[in-house]
Each structure stands twice: as C-alpha cells, then as structure tokens.
Image (spheres, helix red, strand yellow):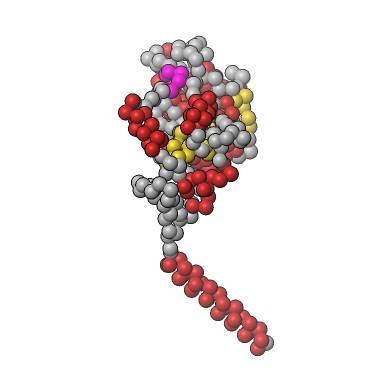
Amino acid sequence: MRLHDTQTAPDLVRRPGQTVAELIAGYLRWRGVERVYGLCGGHIQPVWDALARLGVRIVDVRHECAAVFMAHAEAELTGRPGVALVTAGPGLTNAVTGVANASTARAPVLVLSGRPPRPQTGRGALQELPQRAIVAPLCRAALTADRVREVLPRLDEAMLATAGATAPPGPVYLDFPTDLLAEHVRPADTADWTAAPAGVPEILPGPACLTRAAGLIGAARRPVVIAGREAREAAPELASLLESTGIPYLDSGESRGVLSRDHPSVVSAVRGRAMREADLVITLDRKPELPAGLRLGGGVQPGREVPPGRPLHQPAVRQPARRRRSAVLGQGLRRRARGRAARAGTR
C-alpha cells in the first residue's frame, strides 16, 4: 500500500502564514486524500473549513459511527487509507464501534479528532474524556500532537501505522487540542521535518523459512489454503500455487473475488469439512478460522498435531453452574405461576 509517490513535501504543506488546521488539511490533500467523512463539531471546525477550502470533499453524516464505516469502505475499495473526522467527547465515543470494526477487518482508517484547549486539560472542560485511552486497545496507534512542530511527524506516523508499516493495517487515532489548531506555523516549526517514505517496507521470508514451508506442504495429505487481505495483491501467484499443487482453497471476506467461484480449487461449499479434515492450514495474511459449526466448543486445539486422516475434536465445555442457575430460575417461575393460578381460583 502506497500513500503518495512524492518524497518531498510540496508548497501545499509548507505554505507561509498558515494555521495548524490549514497545515493538517494541506498534508492530507498532499497524501492523496480526496474525501473525508465526518460530523462537524466545535473542536474540529477549523480543520473542517480548511479541508473544504482546499477542495477536499467532506461527506457529512448524521452519526460518527457512519463516518468511520464510510472511511472503512473507501479503504476497502481504493486500497488507500480512509479518513474520518469526529469531534471530541461523544463524537469520538459514537465512533468506537466503527473503529472496532475496522480493527477486526484490518482496514486502514485514520480517525482524526479534537480535544479541549491545553490550559483546560484535566479541569472538566467541555466534552473532555480520556479519548486516547478509550480507543487505544482498538487502534494500531493512538497519538496526539501538543505542539506545532509535532503535527507533521505525528501525521506521518499515523499514516504509516494505518497503512501497515509496523503492524497489520488497521485504524489509527490522532487528535489535536483546539487551541493548537488556531496557532500559526512558523518556518522553524517544519524545517526539520522530512516526509516519511511513501510505501510500507516489504518483508520477505528467509530461505530457511521457505524450505520448511515447502517441506510441510509436501508432507501434508489434506492441506487447505485460506487467504486474507493481501491476497488481493497476489492473485496470479495464488492461482499458480493452487493450480500447481491442487490444494483446496477457502476465501474470506477480505479476499473474496480474488479467485472466481468456478475455479477448480475453490471449495467454499464444503468449508466446514475442509477445515475439520485438514492436516495443514496455509494462511495467506489471515488468521486460521473456525467453521461456524465448530466455534462453540469443537475444533482443532492449537499446538496439537492432527493424525493424518483423523480430525481432532474438542468436546464442548460444560457449564454446570449456569445450568443450575437456569434450573433454579425455572423452578421459581413455575412456582410463581402456580401461585397466581391458585389465587385466581379463590376469587
């Protein structure tokens, strides 16, 4: 995934006399952002206006979660990070479900927000919440910029993190105090900044890993391939692997459409059986998945070898305490019903 083809920031970013809000808008425009999804609020109004002046299309929504969903959809369709702009406090908490969804789907979504002015931090300011702490468990990074000279480095860090430079792609959160957005940018504030690389680094396996993988595939009797997001970028290589080995293939929501449904290796109609009987699961940028019928207790136990031809099943976990509680509750309801019937008969 690439962010932009240019390494040197143009005048769009380093414009003299601009505010921090205009600096943020210029950076996003330079990185190729054409649309921003959001619901306006006072904490983000300066960025909202600056984006509109630069010609960035703003899609106004009625709920912040919808903004993140839309940014997620753009990321899926374009391969570039989608951007959501939400205001502080309830604006951010409304967006959390969308952020969680993007995290699970590993979708590159950048969530920008505002927060109260720096002198009011910790003093019960309007819509003040621990915003970074709220979204940090769901994000690849949760960042803030408190000074003008931090703005561009934080934006670079956020863009690279959401694109997958240091971890799988996913949502990244970045906020700015409202009083910072109004400050003017001096040349010294951006003089030391160098634009981050446009693409994420490519990590290739070593020869020993490839040899071991080839040995496992050669020894397997019932292998299966499950593909994830990055299979979209390697459709010819994936088809060549399957056609040369004859290994059955299962797609996922992240890789649907990489191979046509009538490809001879596609076995989606027997997904559960393929997973149960597999003695080797080859994942391509995807965590191993359990078929729907096995998610409630059965399935292959991690770290245990499956004997060839014999799927390993785990018995369902019993919960006698919950059964006892349900039984007691049921008895109580029955006694109460009988009591009501008896009282009705005496009237």
Q: Against 309, is 57 above or below?
A: above
What kind of secondary structure does the magenta stretch mostly adopt? loop
Kindly identify the residue that appears in the image at 34 percent across and 26 percent down: 206
Q: Against 285, is 28 above or below?
A: above
Kindly identify the residue that appears in the image at 59 percent across and 33 percent down: 263
- Which residue sits furthest bottom? 346
Instruction: Name the quadrant containing residue 161.
Output: top left
Q: Tell me, yes or no, whether the highlighted magenta stretch contains residue 161.
A: no
Q: What range of the chain is rendered magenta?
A: 196-200
Would you say residue 134 is visible in this rendering?
Answer: no
Q: Tell me, yes or no, whether the highlighted magenta stretch contains residue 199.
A: yes
Of the 4 image quadrants, the one containing the C terminus is bottom right
**Residue 167 at x, y = what percent?**
41, 31
**Residue 63 at x, y = what percent?**
60, 39
Kindly identify the residue that appears in the image at 41 percent across and 22 percent down: 201
Kindly identify the residue that appears in the image at 43 percent across and 41 percent down: 221
**Residue 343 at x, y = what percent?**
63, 85
**Residue 133 at x, y = what percent?**
41, 40
Q: Against 309, is 121 above or below?
A: above
| In front of the other: 39 or 283 | 283
| In front of the other: 339 or 182 | 339
Instruction: Name the quadrant containing residue 73.
Output: top right
Q: How many marks?
A: 0
| In front of the other: 322 or 68 | 322
